[in-house]
Amino acid sequence: MMSSVSLASMLASSCRSYAAPLSLLRKLASTSACSLSKNKHHTRDKKNVFALSGLSSKNKAFACESSKPDIAQATSTVSINGYPEYNRLLPCPLHNGPPRIEHLVVSKGGPVLKYICEELKLPPLFVADLIQFGAVHYALVCPRPPPTATPEQIKVFKEVTDPLLLRKRASIKGKTVREAQKTFRITNVDEFVEAGTYLRVHVHPKRFPKCYEIDWKSRILAVSESFVVLDKPAGTSVGGTSDNIEESCATFASRALGLTIPLKTTHQIDNCTEGCVVLARSKEYCSVFHGKIRNKKVKKLYLALAAAPVLIGVITHYMRPVNMAPRLISDDFIKGWNLCQLEVLECKEVCWPNAVIEEKYCVQDCWWPSKDSAYECKINLLTGRTHQIRAQLAALGAPIVGDSIYMPAAIAEMASPGLNPFGKYKKEYTSERDKEMAVAEWTASHGKEPNVAIGLQACQISWDDGEHIYEARSPWWRGEGA
C-alpha cells in the first residue's frame, strides 16, 4: 500500500503534454470500474501518514465533499468543432470552482496515478485528466513552507528534509537542496514517484470553456516554417496556466493546424485580452523571438476601449515590482519601481457597446456612471509590463470597459479623491503604518479578474523593422449591432 506525508495546509497560503493518445484514454476508461471498486475499499495506513492541522472545519468538509460529486464518468462524445472532449472534467463548469490544492510528500514510492487516487480518494480517470491538464507538479525535495506555517508544519518539513535522509537518496546526488526543490510537471500517468518526492495537485484547475466554442482555423493569421500568428480570442490563455496547459491557445491552434509538435509561447497577453500573438514552431525560434523582444525589435499596437477620453501623447507611470494583481502604479518616480510608458496615438469617441454585444462577449458591468460614449484609443506599447495599459488608463480616470479589476478602483478614486496613495491627489502620511494601511485600502478597492472579455485588443504586431506585420480582425466592440 502506498502512503505519504500530507502537507495540505502547509503551503495553502502560498498558492494563488500536449494531447493524450485516445488509445490511452480508452484504456483508462475500460479499467476505471475495477480501479474505482478497489479505491472504494481502500483504507489509509495511519502509521505512514502525517496529516497536518491548520485547516478550518469548513475547509476540511469542503476538501472531503469536493472530491465526490463533481467528477463525471467518461463518455464518448465529440465537441462541435470535432475535438475530443475529456468528459471526466468536461463539460466545463459555467463557473470556476474555488481552488483546491493538495500538497503531499510521498513516504513509499510507486506510480503517481495510483498514489494520488489513494491519498485523495479521487477516481483514476479524473486524476489522469489532471495530469493531462498539467495540474500535477513534483519536486524531488519538499519546498520550504511559507512564514505562516505552524510549528507542527515546520517540524514535518524538517523531518522530510533532514540532511541525513537526503544523503541516502541517489536521485538528488550532486544537486543542491534548492535545485532539488525546483518543481516540474508530471506528464505521464505511469510515472514513478519515489519516497520523499513532493507533489502539488491542483484538484480544481482553472478552466477555459471558451476554447471549445472557437473555430480555431479562422483565427490563424499566418503560418510560416518558424512561427504561427494567431488572433487570440478573449477568455482564453495563450500558453496555459500553472494548473491547465490543455485548454490553451497553443494547444488548440496546434490541433487546428494538424501539427504533431505543439506550438510554443513566445510572449503573453492577458486572458481577457484578444488579438495578435506569435507562437513558435520550434524551441530554436522561440529563443530567436525572445531575443527580438529583448532587443526591442518587436512593436505592439493596441486598441483600448476606455470609459473616458485620454490625451494624445506619451504617458509615464511607475509600477510596483510585486508579481500579483492588482498592479499598483505611481504618478511619481519611486526607487525600485518599474518604468511604464505607452504612447496614445489616437483617441476617438465611439458608442458604448450595447447590452446584446456585452452579453455575447460576457463583458462585465462594472457600474461606470455614464455609458453614453466610450473612447477607442490606439496605443503604442513602449514598455511591456503585465496589466500595464489597464493600470495606466485606470490611473488616468479612463479605465477599460469591462475591466472588473481596475474600473472599481478608478470609480472609488473619483468618489473619494486621495484614496489612491500613489495618485494625483495622494495624501501626506504621518507614519509608515498609516501609509501601509492606505495602500491596503487602495488594493482592496480593486475587483476580481474579468470572466471573459474587456475592451482591449492587441491589434497589430510587427518585428524586424516592419519586415513582418500582422493585424487582428475587427475588435469585438465593433461587432454587428454595436
Image (cartoon, helix red, strand yellow):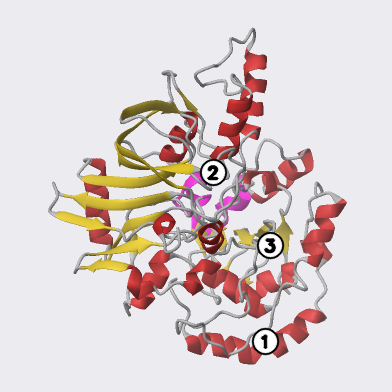
Residues tagged 1 and 2 counted as in contact (Cβ below 8 A): no
How many C-alpha atoms fall within 10 Å of the one at disc 2: few (<14), some, or many (≥20)?
A: some
**Image quadrant assignment for residue 137:** bottom right
How many C-alpha atoms fall within 10 Å of the one at disc 3: few (<14), some, or many (≥20)?
A: many
- Secondary structure, magenta segment, majority class: helix
In this rendering, position of residue 88 left or right of residue 325? right
Seen from the viewer's position, the closer of residues 344 and 222 is: 344
**Can you give x and y, in whole percent of width and height, for residue 133 in the image?**
53, 68
Q: Which residue is mark 3?
A: 107
Camera-nearest label, 3 or 2: 2
**Can you give x and y, in whole percent of width and height, for residue 171 in the image?**
50, 60
Q: Amino acid type of disc 2?
A: Lys
Which quarter of the rendered picture does the N terminus lie within?
A: bottom right
Which of disc 3 and disc 1 is earlier in sequence?
1
Q: Secondary structure at mark 3?
A: loop
Point 22% across, 40% down: residue = 296
